[in-house]
């Protein structure tokens, strides 16, 4: 796992105008103000995956282990808190049908609202010294693993008796 370099400049946490400038200048992202909030344009090879926020601790652990950590935004919602992991498509084409249950693919020509939007925060902040985004296939692999583990153990098959017990039953 490669260590994160020291941060030179953190993203602003309250002023939308300063945040917009920071995202553009420090991260090189295509952002614009939408309803007074910075929004990332999902173009130029950027995508995102929206998933239940309860998955975040395990997802962050797996991302760290696999060295595919990238920016993750948390959103508070009345229905279900969600998180969005940003990724680089690397020219791969995905469809919603390929997503595990509970994961929504965020694709072109969409936008992703960025903090300081009300009810949002960085769960994993972008880092201006490590501007690359992780591969979408790697992030999808992490979310697939988290999805499978959050579904619980697989249903138990009917238990068969060991061979010795079968011999005793025949008599």
Image: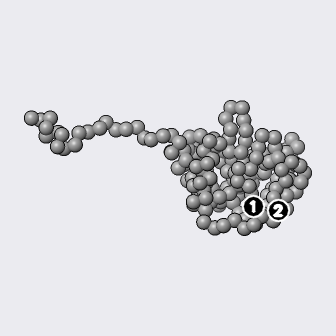
Disc tally is 2
Residue corresponding to mark 1 = 127
Q: Residues within 10 Å of mark 1 (few under 14, many from 20)?
A: many
Say which mark, if any, is on residue 9: 2
Q: Residue at x 13, y 40 (%)?
A: 167
**Contact flag, marks 2 and 1 (Cβ < 8 Å):** no
At which x and y percent is residue 148?
50, 45
Residue lying furthest top: 79
Whether residue 4 is visible to the viewer of this picture, yes or no, is yes
Q: Residue at x 63, y 67 (%)?
A: 2
To which quarter of the image does residue 50 belong? Answer: top right
Q: Residue at x 62, y 53 (%)?
A: 60
Whether residue 88 is visible to the viewer of this picture, yes or no, is no
Which of the marked residues, 2 or 1, is nearer the chain's N terminus? 2
Question: SS at mark 2?
Answer: loop
Q: Quadrant of the C terminus?
A: top left
Question: SS at mark 1?
Answer: loop
At which x and y percent is residue 106?
68, 46
Q: In the rendered image of this protein, does residue 27 appear above or below residue 32?
A: below
């Amino acid at each position: 796992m490669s260590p994160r370099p020291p941060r030179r400049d953190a993203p602003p946490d309250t002023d939308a105008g300063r945040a917009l400038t920071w995202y553009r200048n420090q991260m090189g992202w295509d952002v614009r103000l939408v309803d007074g909030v910075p929004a990332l344009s999902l173009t130029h090879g950027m995508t995102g995956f929206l998933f239940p926020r309860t998955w975040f601790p395990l997802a962050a652990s797996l991302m760290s282990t696999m060295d595919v950590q990238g920016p993750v935004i948390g959103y508070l919602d009345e229905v279900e808190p969600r998180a969005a992991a940003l990724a680089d498509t690397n020219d791969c084409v995905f469809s919603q049908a390929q997503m595990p249950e509970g994961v929504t693919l965020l694709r072109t020509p969409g936008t992703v609202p960025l903090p300081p939007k009300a009810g949002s925060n960085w769960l994993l902040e972008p880092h201006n010294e490590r501007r690359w985004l992780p591969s979408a296939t790697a992030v999808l692999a992490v979310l697939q693993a988290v999805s499978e583990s959050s579904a619980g153990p697989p249903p138990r098959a009917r238990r068969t008796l060991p061979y010795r017990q079968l011999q005793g039953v025949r008599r």
